[in-house]
Image (cartoon, rainbow, N blue to C red):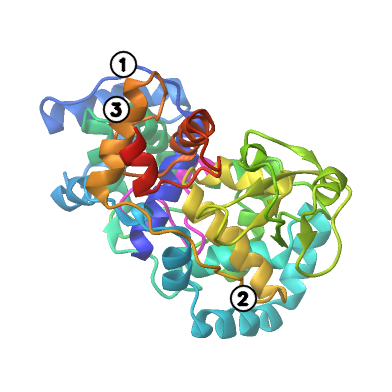
């Protein structure tokens, strides 16, 4: 479960830096593929000799390919998914780590503007606060995935970044391990992101994300800042809703000043609204939990592109900072995997872009659902139901 989350995080981060390219070399003889990497290495600032030493023991890993094709966790609805990930034990350990590393979190907040709950939540979900960081050989994983022709453009640049980390003594191709998609350490970062945002938080002259909580947390904070995190601003706030709300305004496509939401009868469950633009999120429709999402919430999508994961991580961060358990409400039953795929096919047939017919309720599918709900005179809350499927 944790490795699936970590690896998905890596794929989303990698996609930010990789260009769409159908001509990226891949496949063929694995040994010849490695030799081509050695030949290309100098163009990326890596000496051929360094590349040869890095690749000398690298082997193809069939387990990596199996893991890459076996992701299904994000088909779970938000309430079930969040309850699976957020346990009292994780909350207690999070608050204990908050106290233990208080000075580090204070420095991160001062330097990068990232609230401690945000990093604690990532740390919890990715590796259970560093206790389970993955046992896949990182070099093998990266080269295997770059050789595989499914998404070579995502992984080839990470190999050269890993070679640079090897050259500085911060990655051992024989011994460094992590999740199946090549991310490393307590908050699971890819080699390119380590090069760009790695921080020596403990002052030992190295960036050791596997063994140093200071290095890992400081690096995660710097990366979030680089992705656009805005200091001192909230990210997610639970709200209560009036029954008369215009449901078509919900979803990430609509962003309004918080004062406008208040004028429509939306109210914070605790505290007051920030003077910021926000979107109203209904992870399981108008009868389920409801949140106001501020600009910082969107930064999560720069790190991970799953709506369910992002909302769960953002909510858990608020919970670690004192927010109550969300009101789950009584949402209408969702659809099975087969029903979701059938719904996506019907939406595509009506000209909507759902991204992929994969059974996952992503942002594009939610937007298409709202459009069809509005057309059919149903509450346009973006939640797929049997009623909608039958109507289509």
Front-lying residue, 376 or 107: 376
In the displayed structure, does residue 15 sit left or right of residue 63? right
Asked whether 264 falls inside the magenta stretch, the response is no
**Residue at numbered disc 2:** 325
Q: Quadrant of residue 102?
A: bottom right
Above or below residue 135? Residue 139 is above
- 3 or 2: mark nearer the eye: 2
Q: Which mark is residue 37?
A: 3
Query: What range of the chain is rendered magenta?
Result: 180-193
Q: Quadrant of residue 76?
A: bottom left
Which one is in front, 262 or 139? 262
Q: Which label is found at residue 22?
A: 1
Q: Position of residue 258 (x, y in %)?
A: 83, 47
Asked if 57 appears above or below 341 in the picture, the reply is below
Q: Residue at x 51, y 32 (%)?
A: 16
Crowd tier of the residue under label 3, counting other residues whose Cα lies within 10 Å: few below 14, some 14–19, many 20 or above = many
x and y percent of residue 156 in the render?
Answer: 35, 31
Residue at image position (28%, 51%) is: 71
């Amino acid at each position: 479960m944790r490795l699936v989350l970590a690896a998905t995080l890596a794929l989303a981060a990698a996609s930010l830096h990789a260009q769409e390219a159908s001509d990226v070399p891949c496949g063929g003889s694995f040994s010849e593929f490695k030799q081509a990497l050695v030949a290309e290495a100098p163009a990326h600032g890596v000496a051929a000799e360094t590349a040869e030493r890095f690749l000398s023991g690298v082997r193809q890993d069939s387990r990596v390919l199996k893991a890459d094709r076996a992701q299904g966790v994000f088909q779970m609805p938000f309430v079930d998914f969040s309850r699976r990930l957020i346990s009292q034990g994780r909350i207690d350990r999070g608050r204990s780590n908050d106290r233990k590393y208080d000075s580090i979190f204070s420095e991160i907040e001062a330097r990068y503007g990232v609230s401690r709950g945000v990093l604690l939540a990532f740390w919890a979900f990715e590796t259970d606060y560093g206790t389970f960081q993955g046992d896949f050989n990182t070099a093998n994983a990266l080269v295997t995935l770059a050789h595989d022709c499914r998404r070579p453009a995502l992984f080839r640049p990470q190999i050269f970044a890993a070679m640079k980390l090897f050259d500085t003594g911060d990655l051992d191709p024989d011994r460094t391990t992590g999740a199946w998609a090549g991310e490393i350490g307590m908050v699971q970062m890819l080699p390119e992101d380590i090069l760009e945002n790695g921080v020596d938080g403990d002052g030992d002259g190295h960036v050791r994300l596997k063994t140093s909580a200071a290095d890992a947390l400081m690096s995660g904070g710097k990366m979030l800042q680089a992705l656009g995190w805005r200091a001192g601003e909230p990210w997610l706030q639970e709200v209560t809703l009036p029954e008369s709300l215009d449901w078509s305004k919900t979803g990430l496509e609509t962003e309004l000043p918080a004062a406008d939401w208040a004028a429509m009868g939306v109210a914070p469950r605790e505290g007051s609204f920030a003077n910021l633009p926000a979107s109203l999120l209904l992870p399981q429709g108008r009868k389920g939990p409801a949140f106001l999402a501020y600009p910082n919430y969107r930064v999560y999508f720069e790190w991970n592109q799953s709506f369910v994961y992002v909302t769960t991580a953002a909510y858990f961060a608020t919970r670690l900072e004192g927010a109550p358990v969300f009101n789950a409400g009584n949402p209408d039953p969702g659809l099975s995997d087969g029903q979701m795929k059938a719904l996506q096919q019907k939406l595509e047939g009506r000209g909507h872009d759902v991204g992929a017919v994969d059974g996952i309720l992503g942002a594009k599918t939610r937007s298409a659902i709202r459009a069809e709900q509005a057309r059919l005179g149903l509450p346009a809350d973006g939640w797929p139901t049997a009623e909608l499927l039958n109507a289509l």
